[in-house]
Image (cartoon, helix red, strand yellow):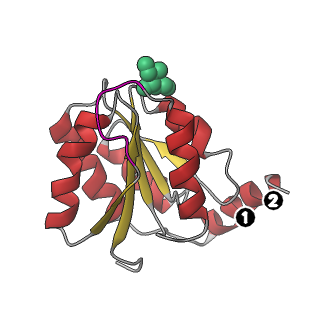
Amino acid sequence: MTQDKKIAIGADHAGFELKEKIKPLLSEIGYEVIDFGTNSTDSVDYPLIAKSLATSVANKNPQRGILICGTGIGMSIAANKIKGIIAAHCCDIETAKLARQHNNSNILTIGGRITDSELAKDIVKAWLNTDFEGGRHQRRVQEIRDLER
Ligand code: RB5
């Protein structure tokens, strides 16, 4: 693995319970976890959590993060508004791997109301353990970066 061993995680109220289940896994596999909240099931607006975590990841502090809301969709839409972020919403292991291999995603989003916690853990492991392939995908990722200008 080439990235540092720090990982950001954040969730809204709909993703809070899954966030709390994923955090111990991240610690077990050697990551220092930086928790951007929320810290209860009280209602909170997901774009605010996405903005806070994605801004840190865009500044490479840390290099990668995980965002969880009810569907995973709102978090990915919001995070992708931050320059430097490639957030991928993944519901299975194959797309989690491809979101690294082809897209070099730096944020993974998951739906806490959609994806069962055991599958979510497997998605997280697959995403963390898969490297970007570069090559033709580097050009395409650069073309995405160019859209930010
Ligand atoms: C909150 O009810 C829900 O809308 C949010 O967690 C997320 O699923 C939005 O995309």
Q: Is residue 112 left or right of residue 45?
A: left
The image quadrant of residue 138 is bottom right
Q: Is residue 33 above or below residue 113?
A: below
Which amino acid does the dot numbered 2 rest on?
Asp
Which amino acid does the dot numbered 1 rest on?
Gln
Residue 7 percent across, percent down from the top left: 37, 64
Is there CB contact under 8 Å for labels 1 and 2?
A: yes
Q: Identify the residue at image location x=55%, y=51%.
A: 52
Q: In this figure, which residue is indicated by the disc labeled 1?
A: 142
Residue 78 percent across, percent down from the top left: 60, 38
Q: Identify the residue at image location x=27%, y=43%.
A: 19
Q: Is residue 20 left or right of residue 94?
A: left
Residues 142 and 35: in front is: 35
Q: Identify the residue at image location x=50%, y=43%.
A: 49
From where the camera sits, is residue 68 visible? yes
Instruction: State whether label 1 is within 8 Å of ligand 1.
Output: no
- Element assignment for label 2: helix
Q: Identify the residue at image location x=71%, y=66%.
A: 139
Magenta stretch prevailing secondary structure: loop
Residue 22 percent across, percent down from the top left: 22, 49
Q: Is residue 98 above or below residue 92?
A: below
Dot 2: within a 10 Å radius of its alpha carbon, few (fewer than 14), some, or many (20 or more) residues?
few
Residue 36 percent across, percent down from the top left: 41, 52
Q: Is residue 12 magenta?
A: no
Q: Give the residues in magenta.
A: 37-43
- Element assignment for label 1: helix
Q: In this figure, which residue is indicated by the disc labeled 2?
A: 146
The image quadrant of residue 144 is bottom right
Q: Is residue 132 above or below residue 46?
A: below
* Distance of label 1 from label 2 (alpha carbons): 6 Å
From where the camera sits, is residue 95 visible? no
Image quarter where ligand 1 lies: top left
